[in-house]
Image: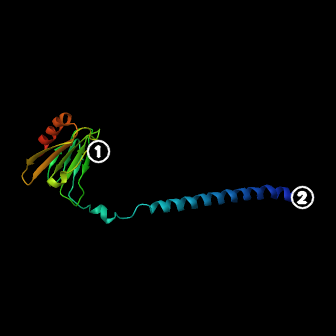
Amino acid sequence: MNTMHRRDRAGPVRRYFSQTTQALSLQIAFFAILAVILSACGRIAPATPPAQLDHTPGPPITIADGTYTSVAFTVDYPAGWTVISSPAFSEPWTAFTSPDDNAVIVVAVDPDDTDVSPASAQGEITRTVETVTLADDTITIVLVTGDSDTFQPIFAAVVASVR
């Protein structure tokens, strides 16, 4: 009977330590998994920026508040129009496409860069060319559209804004 009594007293103690050990094991496993996840996240971003971010080739451009600025010219573009810029390896140019894709206005240092067509031109395609002489370059501005009457006033405003 004494043996039975000792087992009863030892039973709750063993159960307590067993449950505590299980809980502690779960906590250790949780923190080990968390440590592995956090250490993996640290490897996502490199310690130093890659070289191509330190030096992006080509001249800088800025597109802000309805104005496109390159090293050769600055021009205002119509609200709602899409701005397309020249690749870094070429002379500066930009193209503005109308929201309905029925007109393209190209502003370029090299006139050869102005040979474009609107994606959805309706009607007969017309091409209007203007030039603006700045201190260092002559800038060519071209309107290509199938609706000259609608887009001519917008084109005139773009030409007047070249500086």
Pick the residue in front: 63 or 105.
105
The local secondary structure at tag 2 comes to helix
Whether residue 109 is visible = no
**Label ID, residue 85:** none
The local secondary structure at tag 1 comes to loop
Picture residue at 67% right of the left edge, 56% below the top = 23
Label 2 Cα crowd, 10 Å radius (few <14 / some 14-19 / many 20+): few
Residue under label 1: 119
Q: Is residue 101 above or below residue 43?
A: above
Q: Residue 65, how many percent across, how many down?
A: 23, 41
Pick the residue in front: 8 or 38.
38
Whether residue 100 is visible = yes
Residue under label 2: 4
Label 1 Cα crowd, 10 Å radius (few <14 / some 14-19 / many 20+): some
Name the quadrant containing residue 81: top left
Q: Which amino acid does label 1 sit on?
A: Ala
Q: In this view, does 12 lie above or below 122?
A: below
Q: Are marks 1 and 2 in contact (CB under 8 Å)?
A: no
Picture residue at 31% right of the left edge, 65% below the top = 51
**Left or right, 40 with reference to 109:** right
Name the quadrant containing residue 156: top left
Give the mark nearest the N terminus, 1 or 2: 2
How is this picture coloured? rainbow
**Left or right, 13 with reference to 48:** right
Q: Is residue 138 above or below residue 124?
A: below
